[in-house]
Image (spheres, rainbow, N blue to C red):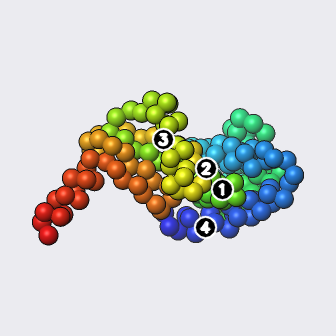
Amino acid sequence: MAELATIARPYAEAIFEAVQAKPAADVLEQVSRALDALALVARDSQVRSLAGDPHLSIERLEELMLAAVPQPAGTAVRNMLRVVLENRRLAALPAIAEQFHRLKDAAQQRAEAVISSAFALDPAQIDELLPVLERKFGCKLYPRVEIDPSLIGGIRVAVGDEVLDTSVRARLDSMRIALSA
């Protein structure tokens, strides 16, 4: 996994720099969606087997992949895809998309908040929680909610490397450690 991240970094940085210079405000979002679509295509086992076919040209593989993307890909995405395919790095496409998202989020001072809860949270609870978390973490957040019954109660929020754990399980673990010390 770390190897794919290392391979993906220069590609993600290159396409980010190429599109960041463009004046259109939504270009980062368009590239982000195109990269997500290509990453999904690259995960398909049939596409991976096609990429290994020595009789299929890189141009044809590129055409097939771009045809599977719902919206037309811009020049920067097509050029990046061509270079990725020429260098036989198809497996790195999902990591490239992930790293592009990180670069985009950093540029927009945004981050994903992974909110784990023992029970489902309704939208009103999330809307109430987000401003508090944004003040705590110091940036604009967009939530991804996961259900984790092992938390028993409360929530666990992960933003990048930082974690805020107010779950019942964390409190019980902390009490167990304190009592055994």
- Which residue does the image show at 42% across and 41% down from the upper left? 146
In this rendering, the label closer to the viewer, 3 or 1: 3
Residue 51, percent across and down?
Answer: 63, 52
Q: Secondary structure at mark 2?
A: strand
Q: At which x and y percent is residue 177? A: 18, 63
Q: How many marks?
A: 4
Q: Nearer the viewer, mark 4 or mark 1?
A: 1
Q: Earlier in the sequence, mark 3 or mark 1?
A: 1
Return the disc, 3 or 2, that comes first in the chain's sequence.
Answer: 3
Q: CA distance from mark 3 to mark 1?
A: 19 Å
Residue labelled with disc 3: 129
Q: Secondary structure at mark 1?
A: loop
Disc 1 marks which residue? 109
Circle 3: residue type: Leu
Q: Which residue is mark 4?
A: 7
Category of crowding for the residue at label 2, using alpha-carbon neighbours closer than 10 angstroms: few (below 14), some (14–19), many (at least 20): some
Alpha carbon distance from label 2 to label 4? 29 Å
**Badge 1 vs badge 2, beta-carbon distance below 8 Å:** yes
What amino acid does circle 4 point to? Ile
Residue 110, given in percent of the width and then of the height, sits at: 62, 52
Q: Amino acid at mark 2?
A: Lys
